[in-house]
């Protein structure tokens, strides 16, 4: 494919890179639902994200989850409407560039979906370690492997494992990845049913005995390890409170923590150019809606069972004791690895082979989800290249599987570098705390585009199925967009300016993070300006491209 990005064209080039993207509609609505379900993953992201909630005293976690679900539903409606207006590959980039303008759309979307996703590779690897490699190693008595995994080189190797796995499943193509995620989905649900059954039919005394037994067997703990964990958690700063306690203020302070996993039902929005029937608003809406609310229901069930069997004080204290030990050099808890509820549930059966098998089965929640690391991002990069902002080779696709391998390379190579920094420069890890916030800012830009769409791009709006949805004469997309925007602004404010630096991301406390992300926005601006200059010399008007809609 001829590259007109950096070279000189012999004749006046066409508007887009080629007549059609070359991508195909390989996914059904159910495939999109499963992808959305994985994106708000109860196990990999949910259990991990909720482990920090003990930092908010008197927080009613279940109420916060339900409130977050309701508010995120407005995000789902907003994105579903945008999909029906313009069901094109690239999602946020396509909408922002066509409504807000090419420059602003490119900078805001590419920073979130490209530069920020580098940071998620080590986050995925860390989750793989604490929810799969380490629990499995300790359960099977492989202490040498556990020691290696926690070393700097071990952390980097885990990052490489994640990058290799994700690269393979993405290059297999959309149809194959859909089959992989569905296999993991159904088997993973069986594993979750086993975990819930163990917690449902065991008493709290059963769990205390099991915890004390396995803490001694696997970690060499002595005495009442269950009570010792609670004591250490209280010493580490956890303020005990009743699970049923309800105060509105603390509930809202929990929301930015929950965003780590519940904010992503729209993660597949960049892929809807490859989903059949996406122009029908019901299909993208229900796929994202059920991805969100099935997860919310499961989270509520698991949380209630954890409180019933493990104990609310123990759950929070175990997290507090571990983080105080791992990050602040506090006393070692009886169980020195991350308090993984799945591993603890498995301890209710006094058989290490069963426990290991349960961890392996529940590991499919990771492997079914892992493709979300790059799959959505490659489509944003692809769309920008198809619009001639990035080099044309980034929009190259394989003839058989329709995989944008050029875009995938632009994700993999920088992620290796960032992973090495994560592993060998722990002092730089504070930057990774803002990975959620920058994506929320990207969503906010899309929401702004949705709010002004009926006036800014009346031609697109009036020709779309959503034009008939109005409330008192006001376009429904504008109303739901305003509510969504206020929700996102609240969380962005808390992440940036919370006076107690509750989330570890306050501008006043995270200089490295501010510099990093400011740098990424500058780089994005430089790329776009350079593209405008080069394209103008080639006789290509990027502003005209960003006014048109590409053919899928």
Image (cartoon, rainbow, N blue to C red):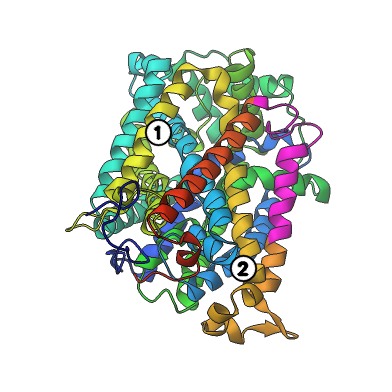
Judging depth in this view, the residue of 288 and 498 nearest the camera is 498
- 404 lies left or right of 115: left
Task: Relative to 15, say whether 459 is above or below.
Answer: below
On whether residue 495 falls in the magenta region, the answer is yes
Magenta residue span: 485-511
Residue 466 picture location, percent across and down: 57, 81
Q: N-terminal of the two: label 2 or label 1? A: 1
Q: Can you identify the residue that label 2 sits on?
A: 450
On whether residue 494 falls in the magenta region, the answer is yes
Q: Disc 2 and disc 1: Cα gap in Å?
A: 31 Å
Residue drawn at point x = 44 percent, y = 28 percent: 418
- 76 lies left or right of 38: right
Q: Which mark is residue 340?
A: none
Query: Based on the displayed image, in which of its 4 quarters is residue 330 positioned?
Result: top right
Query: Based on the displayed image, in which of its 4 quarters is residue 275 positioned?
Result: bottom left
Residue drawn at point x = 50 percent, y = 23 percent: 337
Q: Residue furthest left?
A: 400
Mark 1 element type: helix
Task: Relative to 9, say whether 423 is above or below.
Answer: above
Residue 170 picture location, percent across and down: 29, 49
Residue 395 picture location, percent across and down: 32, 53
- 259 lies left or right of 176: right
Residue 65 picture location, percent across and down: 65, 53
Task: Look at the image and tell me whether residue 243 can be seen.
Answer: no
Marks 2,1: beta carbons within 8 A: no
Mark 2 element type: helix
Task: Relative to 261, say whether 10 is above or below.
Answer: below
Q: Can you identify the residue that label 1 sits on?
A: 414
Task: Look at the image and tell me whether residue 125 can be seen.
Answer: yes
Q: Name the quadrant of the C terminus.
A: bottom left
């Amino acid at each position: 494919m001829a590259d007109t990005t950096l070279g000189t064209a012999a004749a006046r080039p066409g508007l887009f890179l080629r007549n059609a993207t070359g991508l195909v509609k390989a996914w059904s609505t159910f495939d999109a639902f499963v992808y959305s379900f994985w994106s708000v993953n109860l196990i990999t992201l949910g259990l991990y994200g909720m482990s920090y909630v003990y930092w908010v005293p008197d927080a009613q976690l279940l109420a916060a989850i339900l409130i977050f679900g309701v508010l995120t539903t407005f995000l789902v409606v907003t994105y579903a409407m945008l999909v029906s207006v313009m069901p094109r590959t690239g999602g946020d980039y396509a909408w922002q560039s066509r409504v807000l303008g090419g420059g602003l759309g490119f900078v805001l979307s590419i920073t979130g979906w490209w530069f920020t996703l580098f940071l998620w590779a080590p986050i995925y690897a860390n989750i793989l370690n604490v929810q799969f490699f380490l629990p499995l190693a300790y359960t099977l008595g492989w202490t040498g492997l556990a020691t290696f995994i926690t070393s700097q080189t071990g952390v980097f190797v885990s990052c490489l494992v994640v990058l290799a796995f994700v690269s393979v499943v993405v290059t297999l193509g959309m149809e194959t990845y859909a089959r992989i995620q569905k296999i993991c989905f159904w088997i993973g649900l069986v594993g979750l049913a086993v975990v819930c059954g163990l917690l449902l039919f065991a008493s709290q005394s059963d769990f205390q005995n099991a915890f004390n037994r396995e803490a001694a067997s696997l970690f060499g703990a002595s005495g009442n390890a269950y009570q010792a964990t609670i004591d250490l958690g209280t010493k580490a700063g956890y303020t005990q409170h009743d699970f049923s306690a309800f105060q509105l203020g603390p509930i809202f302070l929990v929301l930015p923590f929950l965003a780590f996993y519940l904010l992503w039902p729209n993660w597949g929005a960049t892929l809807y150019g490859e989903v059949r029937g996406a122009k029908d608003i019901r299909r993208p809406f229900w796929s994202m809606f059920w991805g969100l609310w099935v997860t919310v229901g499961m989270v509520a069930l698991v949380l209630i069972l954890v409180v019933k069997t493990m104990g609310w004080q123990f759950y929070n204290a175990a997290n507090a004791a571990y983080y105080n030990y791992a990050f602040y050099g506090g006393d070692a808890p009886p169980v020195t690895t991350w308090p993984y509820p799945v591993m603890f549930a498995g301890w209710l059966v006094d058989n290490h082979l069963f426990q290991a098998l349960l961890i392996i089965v529940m590991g499919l929640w990771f492997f079914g989800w892992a493709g979300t690391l790059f799959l959505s991002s490659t489509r944003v990069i692809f769309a920008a290249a198809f619009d001639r902002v990035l080099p044309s080779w980034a929009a190259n696709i394989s003839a058989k599987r329709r995989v944008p391998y050029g875009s995938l390379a632009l994700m993999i190579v920088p992620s290796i570098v960032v992973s090495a920094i994560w592993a060998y420069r722990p002092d730089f890890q504070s930057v990774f705390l803002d990975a959620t916030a920058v994506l929320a800012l990207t969503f906010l830009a899309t929401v702004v585009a949705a709010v002004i769409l009926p006036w800014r791009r009346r031609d697109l709006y009036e020709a779309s199925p959503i034009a008939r949805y109005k409330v008192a004469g006001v376009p429904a997309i504008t109303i739901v967009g305003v509510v969504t925007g206020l929700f996102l602004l609240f969380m962005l404010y808390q992440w940036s300016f919370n006076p107690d630096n509750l989330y570890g991301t306050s501008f006043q406390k995270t200089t490295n993070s501010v510099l990093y992300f400011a740098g990424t926005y500058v780089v994005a601006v430089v790329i776009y300006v350079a593209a405008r200059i080069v394209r103008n010399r080639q006789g290509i008007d990027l502003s005209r491209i960003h006014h048109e809609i590409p053919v899928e």
